[in-house]
Amino acid sequence: MSVLALVEQIDGQVDELSLQALSLARELADGEPLTALLAGEGGREASAQLGSHGVANALVAEDERLGAYAPGAWARSVTDAIDRLGTGAVVAPGTVRGNEVLSHVAARLDLPFAANCAAIDERSPLTVTRVRWGGSLLEEARVHGSPALLSVAPHTVPAATVNGADAPSVESFAPALDENDLLVRVAEHVDAATAGISLAEAKVVVSGGRGVGSADGFGMLEELAELLHAAVGCSRVVTSAGWRPHTDQVGQTGTKVSPDLYIACGISGATQHIAGCKGAKKILAINSDAEAPILASADYAVIGDLTEIVPAITAELRKGREP
Ligand SMILES: Cc1cc2nc3c(=O)[nH]c(=O)nc-3n(C[C@H](O)[C@H](O)[C@H](O)COP(=O)(O)OP(=O)(O)OC[C@H]3O[C@@H](n4cnc5c(N)ncnc54)[C@H](O)[C@@H]3O)c2cc1C
């Protein structure tokens, strides 16, 4: 099958998850020459790194408006490339961008899109294994429509190399972008305010859910976190309510954390939240409901009102540190 692989790169360096996606793309191509599509500045430079990953041809979408990420513009680049090549499948990394771009492509071409694939089970009819529910479920899915649109679940396929491959031939083209393709685009990059401790790498995470009650309620969690040199996390309810920024969200659609201790305050323990904290060595749940689902995942639990329990823990920690 002729396969087009969407490759992400930053300043000419190919993203690791794109290299993983190329492994699955190569398997699907089954010996046919694999073509990679790169967009934006650095695409030409990045394409030189793809020969050892089995890419025979690189198509580089060039337009100064592709300098900043714009999902519609990238999708236009993919649909133009499909028209040029008559490709049988498009494979992208299962990143936020890869999934977003293929969603646009699927909508424009009125095709189904299988996100987060971990394996090709059969080529005809095309059958894939998809990772669903934050890794709790593997689904076998038949993909109809042509070209087939697939993204590859991160870290499910190794970024394998091939021996003795030459650098790919490189061809550039100008996608036919219009104003609508650029309605949504990255305008500015702002570094997250992490107070020095990153959520993904913290040894202790103090996390709050709806039970915290308000944005101000997080003040007591921050106090405890400071004493424990911990990062503050939260559930999606909290980010949806605007109490904390999305960068603090733990879960399937947030950050995956693996601290030594995860303190879940007023969090019920929905599967989508647990998907983000199940890597913790120990979980302490503070919850007023003795039947809350989080207790099934917790190593320790304190049943009661967090507005009494959290300040009490903080006070004990302070006492222990008094000279
Ligand atoms: C596709 C999809 C993706 C999602 N991704 C995520 C994700 O990445 N992360 C995420 O968190 N959620 C995610 N969700 C949402 C998830 O399903 C839950 O709705 C959410 O996690 C619930 O948040 P919560 O535990 O804060 O709120 P609730 O479920 O309302 O739980 C609040 C808890 O607080 C307790 N409580 C209340 N008052 C107190 C008090 N005073 N003291 C102590 N305990 C108290 C209650 O007993 C209850 O257990 C996703 C959902 C979908 C459909």
Image (cartoon, rainbow, N blue to C red):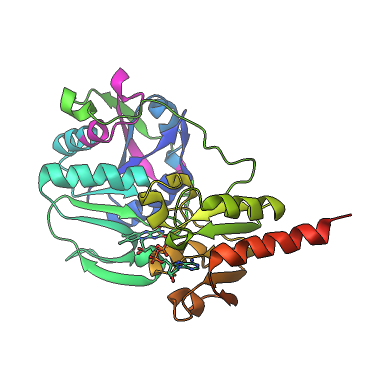
Tell me which corner region of the image, top left, top right, bottom left or bottom right, holds residue 98.
top left
Does 208 sit left or right of 122 as displayed? right
The picture places residue 287, in percent across and down from the top left corner, at 51, 71
Kindly give the residue lying farthest to the right in the view shown.
Answer: 323
**Is residue 34 visible in the rendered structure shown here?**
no
Q: In screen coordinates, is 150 left or right of 145? A: right
Find the magenta span and give its range.
52-75
User: 217 or 43, which lies in front?
Assistant: 217
Q: Residue at x 59, y 75 (%)?
A: 302
Is 71 contained in the magenta span?
A: yes
Quarter placement of the C terminus: bottom right
- Percent x, y of residue 12: 46, 29
Q: Is residue 261 above or below residue 176?
A: below
Position of 192 relative to 147 (above/below): above
Quarter for ligand 1? bottom left
State left or right for residue 242 relative to residue 297: left
Q: Is residue 146 magenta?
A: no
Tell me residue 22's x, y (percent): 38, 49
The foreground one among 194 and 252 is: 194
* Outermost residue toward the top in this view: 64
Which quadrant would residue 182 be assigned to in this image?
top left
